[in-house]
């Protein structure tokens, strides 16, 4: 139960002065629904504004405050175009105040023609005209007082302004309670950090360099502590020591020799499963590295010991692919493999549930359906979780609770993660790495060409489809943006459908699940030849006939995403091609990143080098469901402070009395503050 001292932080934002249903919509879009959300909505940057008397005194790119009188309002012919208010300074210089989207309604109210206003914002030039895009402040009275150091600039959504967000943040900061200190006293003194409450106040002012470091450390400590509690709970709970005799594994008739990395990983897993303490292990392997074979070997160990195993997949279509693969590979062993998804109804579902209960089903494959309350097992001893980052800790724990004793857990991911960040995401797990690709895998021919040659590319796709092959076409967005020129799947699908007709299908995250699955099945079955998609396919089914992938505006994707997307081709024996269409204005870093994609197919090397080139935002921020990525700590802070936070969490648990000591009670508050309270729930009596 949440400590009472934190209750003021969880008060809903709609209780704030001036907040009604209309304002709640944009606040909800940013996730600012409680006091703590606003308190932790830290400025993206700080600006220093200068008051000027006319536009001649301002430099391009400078943050200014100037008195302007609107002379004309201009609407765009396109509904997605900009809305401009032309205004002049005291000596007649013209400046366009430019708005996009619904912000035009605000402009009409704030900037009546002929009435002087004080405008604050960044002065830029568009063509021959000076402009200020989305002014930060528009005031009736003199706003020269806005010329100050370190004005915070917050992330906004449509319907919010900087002054409104700043006012709400100020209200939230007034409600902050004093909390006991959870940081180890020696470290607190060495770092010279402010208290938690002071750190939040200072972080919004930008006047204390270490305030944000302290807040980031809090988040890293909470995460490390929660993951250690998961690991400690797993070790403390009595599991089952499983010793397979190999009689099923010896019957496997694999058409290939396992790699050294596969054999090493199986040995590590077998060693863990022979212990009474439940295994908690992560299997990292590049796309096509052979994780499924390792998982099957682990599940057969459980079956050899007279127990059951379950594999949890993130989507129904992926579950069905796993089922077919495992059923085929396991056939010589005689192990019974079944599948349970949301589609199973009536007698079919009853038969599966009965088979699990009487033990006639050895291995179950499925989606989240397999840990529903109505699903019970005779003796579940191993849980395998595919694409582990898509499931929250609570879901994993719910599945683990299905065994008579705590089952062993093997999590798998094809997302390449740098070693320096593995601790941040999977600190509660031991790690095995498949760092070799099976022999005979065809290298994927990766090419980089200009987006300007897209017509040539479409013609190339037409020739490819005419040869009987299939292809993917990937876009960075679902639909057109009002403010950015980003390739959108829906628009590309429409244009390609005109050319290729019913041979084209589309999948993206905003489609209804049944529509998405139906389209994916059409493609996987060969009824459709071209699949237009977003990154939703980075974890997807294998389609051996799909030997071409086109990725539009490749520079807009993270390297880890590009690498996983590319891995969807090259699944068969045919040579495969991945074409990266690039924009014309690539930064130096962007050129290096795309060059790296041409140079190597080693996902771990790509992840490490991308970390150096681009930073780890995407690596820490693309966990699409389950527990959230870090919201306070940036990459530099993670690399600098995570080892210390992890060591401090271990020290608290092993030396300083855990969560029952005085500091431990404060750390318990920290876990609830960052909503890692699932860690507290694992404690007996917690």
Image (tube, helix red, strand yellow):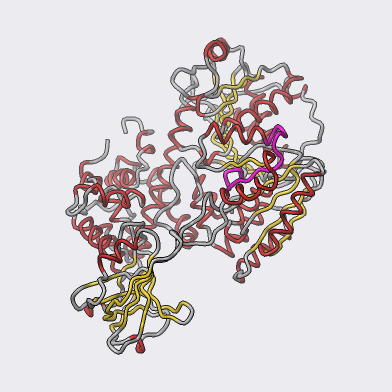
Residue furthest to the front in view is: 77
The front one of 277 and 405 is 405
The front one of 97 and 33 is 97
Assign the C terminus to one quadrant of the image.
Answer: top left
Assign the N terminus to one quadrant of the image.
Answer: top left
User: Image quadrant of residue 18?
Assistant: bottom left
| Horizontal side, residue 401 vs residue 418: left or right | left
Look at 81% across and 43% down and name the residue there.
439
Q: Position of residue 53 (x, y in %)?
A: 28, 87
Q: Is residue 157 magenta?
A: no
| Horizontal side, residue 283 vs residue 118: left or right | right
Chain part drawn in magenta: 523-538
Residue 376 in the image: above or below residue 526? above
Q: Position of residue 214 (x, y in %)?
A: 35, 60
Look at 74% across and 56% down and name the residue there.
446
Task: Report the label total.
Answer: 0
Q: Position of residue 228 (x, y in %)?
A: 44, 42
Q: Position of residue 542 (x, y in %)?
A: 69, 37
| Horizontal side, residue 368 vs residue 226: left or right | right
Look at 20% across and 41% down and name the residue there.
4
The front one of 503 and 395 is 503
User: Image quadrant of residue 50?
Assistant: bottom left
Q: Is residue 524 magenta?
A: yes
The front one of 516 and 211 is 516
């Amino acid at each position: 139960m949440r400590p009472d001292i934190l209750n003021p932080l969880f008060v809903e934002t709609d209780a704030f002065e001036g907040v009604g249903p209309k304002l709640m919509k944009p606040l909800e879009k940013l996730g600012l629904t409680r006091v703590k959300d606003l308190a932790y909505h830290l400025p993206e940057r700080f600006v220093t504004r200068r008051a000027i008397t006319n536009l001649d005194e301002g430099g391009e790119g400078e943050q200014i405050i100037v008195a302007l009188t609107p002379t004309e309002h201009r609407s765009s012919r396109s509904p997605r175009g900009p809305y401009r208010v032309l205004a002049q300074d005291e000596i007649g210089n013209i400046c366009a105040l430019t708005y996009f989207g619904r912000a035009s309604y605000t402009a009409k109210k704030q900037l009546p023609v002929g009435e002087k206003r004080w405008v604050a914002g960044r002065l830029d030039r568009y063509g021959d005209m000076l402009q200020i895009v989305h002014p930060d402040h528009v005031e009736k009275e003199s706003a020269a007082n806005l010329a100050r150091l370190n004005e915070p600039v917050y992330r906004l959504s449509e319907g919010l302004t900087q002054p409104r967000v700043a006012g709400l943040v100020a209200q939230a900061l007034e409600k902050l309670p004093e909390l006991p200190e959870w940081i180890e006293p020696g470290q607190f003194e060495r770092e010279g950090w402010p208290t938690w409450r002071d750190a939040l106040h200072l972080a919004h002012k930008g006047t204390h360099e270490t305030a944000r470091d302290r807040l980031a450390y809090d988040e890293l400590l909470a995460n490390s502590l929660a993951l250690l509690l998961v690991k400690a709970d797993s070790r403390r709970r009595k599991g089952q020591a499983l010793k397979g005799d190999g009689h099923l594994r010896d019957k496997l008739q694999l058409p290939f020799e396992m790699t050294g990395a596969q054999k090493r990983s199986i040995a590590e897993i077998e060693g863990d499963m022979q212990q009474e303490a439940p295994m908690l292990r992560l299997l990292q392997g590049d796309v096509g590295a052979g994780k499924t074979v390792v998982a099957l070997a682990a599940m057969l160990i459980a079956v050899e010991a007279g127990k059951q195993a379950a594999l949890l997949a993130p989507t129904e279509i992926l579950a069905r692919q796993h089922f077919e693969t495992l059923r085929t590979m396991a056939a010589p062993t005689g192990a019974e493999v079944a599948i349970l998804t949301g589609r199973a109804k009536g007698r079919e579902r009853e038969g599966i549930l009965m088979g699990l209960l009487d033990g006639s089903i050895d291995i179950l494959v499925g989606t989240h359906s397999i840990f529903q309350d109505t699903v019970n097992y005779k003796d579940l001893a191993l849980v395998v979780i595919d694409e582990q980052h898509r499931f929250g800790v609570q879901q994993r724990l719910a599945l683990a609770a299905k065994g008579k004793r705590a089952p062993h857990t093997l999590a798998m991911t094809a997302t390449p993660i740098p070693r320096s960040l593995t601790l941040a995401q999977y600190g509660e797990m031991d790690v095995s790495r498949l760092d070799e690709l099976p022999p005979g895998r065809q290298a994927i021919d990766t090419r980089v060409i200009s987006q300007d040659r897209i017509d040539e590319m479409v013609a190339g796709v037409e020739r490819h489809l005419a040869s009987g092959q299939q292809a993917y076409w990937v876009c960075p967005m679902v639909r057109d943006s009002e403010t950015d020129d980003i390739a959108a799947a829906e628009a590309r699908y429409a244009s390609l459908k005109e050319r290729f007709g019913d041979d084209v299908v589309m999948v993206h995250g905003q489609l209804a699940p049944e529509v998405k699955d139906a389209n994916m099945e059409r493609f996987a079955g060969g009824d459709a030849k071209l699949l237009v998609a977003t990154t939703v396919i980075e974890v997807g089914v294998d389609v051996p006939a799909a030997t071409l992938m086109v990725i539009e505006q490749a520079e807009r994707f993270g390297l880890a995403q590009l690498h996983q997307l590319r891995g969807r081709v090259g699944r068969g024996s045919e040579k495969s091609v991945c074409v990266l269409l690039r924009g014309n204005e690539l930064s130096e870093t962007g050129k290096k990143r795309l060059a790296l994609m041409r140079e190597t197919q080693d996902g771990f090397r790509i992840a490490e080098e991308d970390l150096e080139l681009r930073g780890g935002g995407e690596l820490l921020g693309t966990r699409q469901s389950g527990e959230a990525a870090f919201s306070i700590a940036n990459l530099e802070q993670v690399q600098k402070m995570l080892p210390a936070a992890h060591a401090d969490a271990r020290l608290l648990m092993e030396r300083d009395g855990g969560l029952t000591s005085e500091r431990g009670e404060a750390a318990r508050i920290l876990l609830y503050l960052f909503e890692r309270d699932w860690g507290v729930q694992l404690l007996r009596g917690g």
